[in-house]
Amino acid sequence: MINTPIIDTNNIGADNNVKVVTRFAPSPTGFMHIGSIRTALFAYLLAKKNNGTFILRIEDTDKDREVKGSIEHISQSLKWLGIDWDYGPDKPGPFGSCVQSERLLTYRIFAQKLIDKGYAYPDPYTPAEVEEFRKQAEANKQPFLYRNHRPKTFETWDGTKPLRFKVPEIKKYHWYDAVRGNLEAGEEALDDFILIKSDGFPTYNFAHIIDDLNMSVTHILRADEFISSTPRFLSLYDALEIKPPVFVTLPPILREDHTKKLGKRDGAKDVLEYRTEGFLPEAVLNLLALIGWNPGTTQELFSKEELIKAFEIEKIQRAGGSFNEEKLAWFNHQYIAKLSSENFASHASIYLPEWLSTSSPVFKRAVPTLREKVIKMSDVMDILSPKGELGFIKELPVYSSEMLLWKKEPDPVASITHLKKVKEIISGLAEKTFSSESIKLALWPYAETAGKGNVLWPLRMALTGQEKSPDPFVCAYILGKVETLERIDKALEKLKEL
């Protein structure tokens, strides 16, 4: 266990003179929803926009739900997207560890403060007794409130029973949210909630408030489901006599039909699934930034640095926005188009068939065509498959002699004549300057004279054996001069069979 120093941050809050500190505090439960990642992104952007501090805090106090390897999974997800933290599970801060299970001493210290003030007491009831209270409330058609069953005298807490918070004052709460404006909730929102469970671990309701205090967090960015719990948090802030941070409630991420929040049942994916499918981190980051945040301009493509510069809380919207995979695909295609040949090869390498490597000349020649056609990097597999548009690269598909004839003028003699002329022209091109442009420049005058279909159709079929492919000049360039001439010779032999 790490002993964590206690830092007095009673003056932290919505004070422009105080350094901005934000945090992303996921639970290690094994799934990184895009909504969670969007929260991390906005917290990161706010901190960096203000030259502040961004903290990755792991809230691992619910050991029943913890999934092995989740902390590494969370770290990988953020690192992939370029969301770096100043303090995190691998970087303790001046406040100590960023992992809640390593901060138990801190929670006990603050629990004792509440006990000393008369604002915390050991829960005297069994789970069965509490369930009976719930049934009674239901039978009386009343909301269940634990505070209605609060014992008149408290035992000494020895850690074997849950420790509950005693609400100091039952009142209506008013608070300000940087996105939602003025909010309020009635007395029914307050209750005596558990601070520390019988297993010694704190609840979220308690731990996050203590950690935010100790880590000097100035702004809490979180989802709208926490609005209903805010009065309880405010009651605890009051009991501890600390000033709350700035609340920033983010709009929900909706399904594409805007009818409800996007969840696992609606096809929500773990963020690293998008990496596996071949989406670039820049595209995912760009799309998430624009869900619930409006830069106020027509600009759509933003680098991380541009997002930091443009980000402002005032531009966060109240209404939810949808996660649209078609839009994500559009973003991805834009970013793929910007990749250098070297970077494209790096991203494409894991999707290449065994017979092709990024160092081979034919792959290097195919990069411009692939970059133009790929929507997500995994598309490389389909495009290079036997039935794909560039499947002809590995080997010439089997095709009939008739396929070499131009449909409008199916004359074998004419096709032989044209292919021989094409072979002659291509043979005369220099290896060093062999490119789709030089091939087209050399063949085009002849194609215009003899008829484009008469010349280019037999050439396309000779090189690819398929109707759907890039234009024959590009195909010839990708295959290279030697392979192109060999395939033309094979086509000529086939035509002799007619």
Image (tube, grey):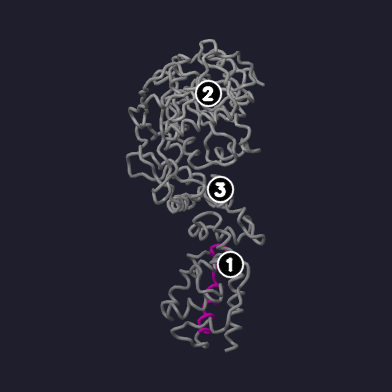
Which residue does the numbered mark 2 point to in the structure image?
206
Q: What element carries label 2?
A: helix
Q: In which quarter of the image is the C terminus?
A: bottom right
Q: Is mark 1 on a helix, strand or loop?
A: helix
Q: Which residue is drawn at 52% across and 42% down?
A: 33
Say what amino acid the circle numbered 1 marks: Gly
Location of residue 357 in the rendering, given as x and y in whole percent from the top left corner:
64, 57
Most common secondary structure along the magenta stretch: helix
Nearer-the-camera pick, 188 or 467: 188
Q: What element carries label 3?
A: helix
Query: Callout 3 environment at 10 Å: few (<14), some (14 to 19), or many (20+)?
Result: some
Mark 3 against mark 2, which lies toward the viewer? 2
Which region shows up in magenta? 415-434
* 1 and 2 marks in contact (CB < 8 Å): no
Which residue does the numbered mark 1 point to in the structure image?
391
Count of marks, rendered view: 3
Which residue does the numbered mark 3 point to in the structure image?
275
State how far apart marks 3 and 1 are (Cα): 24 Å
Classify 34 as above or below 404: above
Location of residue 170 in the rendering, given as x and y in whole percent from the top left corner:
41, 19
State how far apart marks 1 and 2 are (Cα): 59 Å
State how far apart marks 3 and 2 are (Cα): 35 Å
Location of residue 3 in the rendering, given as x and y in whole percent from the top left corner:
64, 17
Is-magenta flag for residue 424?
yes
The answer to whether residue 250 is visible is: yes
